[in-house]
Amino acid sequence: MSWLWAIIVGFVLGLIAKAILPGKQQIPLWLTTVFGILGSVLGNAVAGWIGVEDTRGIDWTRHLLQLLGAVAVVGVGDMLWASIRGSKQRA
């Protein structure tokens, strides 16, 4: 069940990250989900490093860090995807 939850959270975070980023992202939906999962893992790691990974109540700081991680990963991943796809379309 944890894998299903990770996929759902990654999907939602990826979509929110795409909505936050300016312009149109060219990455497909499956890659948005993967980048959302990676951003969530990155946000959890940062939360652990600064000591806010487990608080009482809702972990707003951890959730914000997960979203920021997803925005960063989706932004960088979209640029990489566009450069890879651009070079393949020219060939």
Image (cartoon, grey):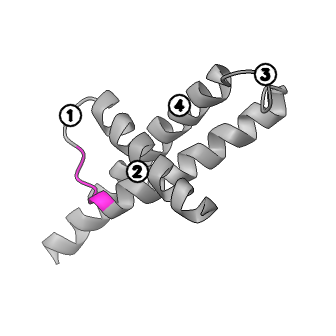
C-alpha gap between disc 3 and disc 1: 37 Å
If you read the primary sequence from the N terminus, does the residue marked by circle 1 or circle 2 appear first? 2
If you read the primary sequence from the N terminus, does the residue marked by circle 3 or circle 4 appear first? 3
Q: Comparing marks 3 and 1, which lies closer to the viewer?
A: 3
Q: Nearer the viewer, residue 84 or 72?
A: 72
From the image, tell me which residue sits under label 1: 23
Range covered by the magenta-colored residues: 25-29
From the image, tell me which residue sits under label 4: 68
From the image, tell me which residue sits under label 3: 56
Q: Position of residue 51 (x, y in %)?
A: 85, 27
If you read the primary sequence from the N terminus, does the residue marked by circle 1 or circle 4 appear first? 1
Magenta span includes 57: no
Q: Nearer the viewer, residue 82 or 64?
A: 64
From the image, tell me which residue sits under label 2: 11
If you read the primary sequence from the N terminus, does the residue marked by circle 3 or circle 1 appear first? 1
Query: Is the residue under label 4 in contact with that under label 3 (CB below 8 Å)?
Result: no
Element type where label 3 sits in the image = loop
Identify residue type, mark 4: Leu
Residue at screen point 46% across, 59% down: 34
Q: Comparing marks 4 and 2, which lies closer to the viewer?
A: 2
Identify residue type, mark 1: Gly
C-alpha gap between disc 3 and disc 2: 26 Å
C-alpha gap between disc 1 and disc 4: 17 Å
Element type where label 1 sits in the image = loop
Identify residue type, mark 2: Phe
Magenta span main SS: loop
